[in-house]
Image (cartoon, helix red, strand yellow):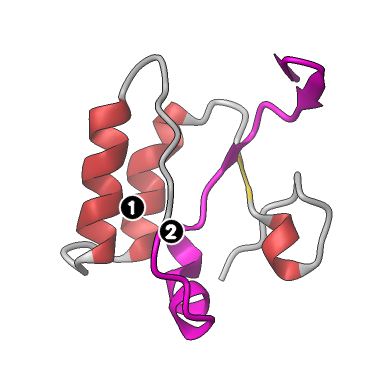
């Protein structure tokens, strides 16, 4: 777990690249990429390439996997526990 002030958070990285279709259907127009200690430029480039459809979302997820040693999570988007990852 990670400590953020008074909060304890999962070490998993929130990743919604495979969920872009659902986000655009719900009129989401902006997303935030949290800066990381390392590899932020690679993460931004992968997100851009996925958003512009230069690569498929699954390929983008594969490219980001080395930067998430504890895995990904997106459960809250699917009404599941937040630490889970729902594949689409």
Q: Nearer the viewer, residue 48 or 12?
A: 48
Residue 60's label in the rendered image is 1
Residue in the image at 40% along x and 61% along y = 30
Q: Position of residue 40 (x, y in %)?
A: 31, 28
Residue in the image at 29% along x and 66% along y = 56
Which residues fall within the magenta stretch? 1-30
Residue in the image at 33% along x and 42% along y = 63
Tell me the quarter of the picture where residue 24 sits.
Answer: bottom left
Tell me the quarter of the picture where residue 9 sits.
Answer: top right
Q: Nearer the viewer, residue 58 or 30?
A: 30
Q: Position of residue 87 (x, y in %)?
A: 60, 64
Residue 10 placement, left or right of 25: right
Secondary structure found at label 1: helix
Q: Which residue is mark 2?
A: 17
Q: Nearer the viewer, residue 47 or 32?
A: 32
Q: Is 85 placed above or below 25 here?
A: above
């Amino acid at each position: 777990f990670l400590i953020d002030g008074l909060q304890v958070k999962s070490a998993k990285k929130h990743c919604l690249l495979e969920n872009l279709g659902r986000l655009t259907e719900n009129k989401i127009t902006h997303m935030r990429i949290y800066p990381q200690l390392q590899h932020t430029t690679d993460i931004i480039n992968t997100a851009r390439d996925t958003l512009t459809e230069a690569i498929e979302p699954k390929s983008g997820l594969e490219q980001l996997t080395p930067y998430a040693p504890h895995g990904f999570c997106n459960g809250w988007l699917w009404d599941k526990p937040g630490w889970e990852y729902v594949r689409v």
